[in-house]
Image (tube, rainbow, N blue to C red):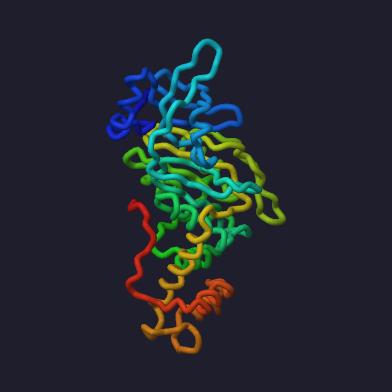
Amino acid sequence: MNTEIIMWNERRRQEFTAYASLGLLPGRVVGEHRSHYQVVTEEGELSATATGRIRNAARERSELPGVGDFVAVHPAQGDSFATIDAVLPRTSALVRKASGARNPQLLAANIDVAFIVTVVDGDFNLARIERYLALVSESGAAPVIILNKSDLTHDVNSPMAQIAQIAPGVPVHLISARDPDTIQQITRYFNDNRTIVLIGSSGVGKSTLTNQLLGRVAQATQEVRAHDSRGRHTTTHRQLYTRPEGGCLIDTPGLRGLELWNPRTAIKTDSENIDALAKKCRFRDCQHQLEPGCAVRAAVERGELDADRYANYVTNARAPTNDRPGGHRRKL
């Protein structure tokens, strides 16, 4: 097993000590399917199922093993699957409310950075980007926004400016996934063997970007629909890949609908975004209603801030502050 690639470091070795004495193998979940998991171990890649004990102990679906998890595996006996006997503590977890279900769904575990992939063409959606930012804020990973398909439009300044308003301090990179030269600016996020997850809607180019970052064709790609710039699902399950240069990449299916498991995070994100705008108001005690030089109202008039969110903010009398702490994000 290449311990550097799957990041089986000293911390993980310490956590695994008790399981090693039981004859279990250390591994990492790299694929999740309906009937089994793919797990990389020192004996190679195994097909494994979770034990009944793990399934019975899980209070939520998101507590079951998932892609990115470090696990203790009992080798297969005969023609049977290997079994995952334990999941080691997670450093981060990207969890969303599963579509049509009440249980939370784990998208990826033990990730360092989340690439929020969107496009600068007709499918650009600021509210959707805000929901992705809220999702990543809950996970414990660091967000990075990837604006793809820069080769398809000449108007890149407007989406860049809009993102800067809602996500101050979050890195934004303008790329074309079909152009390797533009990809170089984001490969640094894999330094120190980091694990990165790609999230975004269908058709934003995640599969093409995955292939470029891996230097090989790992995912099939399809063209988006011409009339609305929307794509079709090409990635059907979550999968962890290793890069020859170091680091890991998790590709995920496109998320057409995104519901947060903790909606309060979205409310907090809205408040923080407006607070950031409020710092640019002419008056420190601006109430964002009739005062001249109000940066918040100006953002509404320019279409950079949703009017309903502005109205909700004012109705709840959230006074602007200059010392409100931001969300807890990993430093890159």
Total label count? 0
Coordinates of residue 179 in the picture (x, y in percent)? 50, 46
The residue sitting at 53% across, 75% down in the picture is 310
For residue 91, above or below residue 85: below
User: As drawn, which residue projects farthest toward the right?
Assistant: 227
**Camera sees residue 60:** yes
For residue 186, above or below residue 73: below
**Camera sees residue 66:** no
Image quadrant where residue 154 sits: bottom right
Coordinates of residue 184 in the picture (x, y in percent)? 41, 46
Q: Nearer the viewer, residue 330 or 227?
A: 330
Q: Nearer the viewer, residue 50 or 283?
A: 50
User: As drawn, which residue projects farthest toward the top?
Assistant: 78
The residue sitting at 34% across, 31% down in the picture is 8
Q: Nearer the viewer, residue 151 or 313?
A: 313
Image quadrant where residue 3 sits: top left
Residue 315 horizontal side relative to residue 169, left or right? right
Coordinates of residue 126 in the picture (x, y in percent)? 55, 63
For residue 228, above or below residue 16: below
Coordinates of residue 322 in the picture (x, y in percent)? 34, 75
The residue sitting at 60% across, 39% down in the picture is 235
Q: Quadrant of the N terminus?
A: top left
The residue sitting at 37% across, 41% down in the picture is 194
Residue 43 horizontal side relative to residue 298, left or right? left
For residue 287, above or below residue 127: below
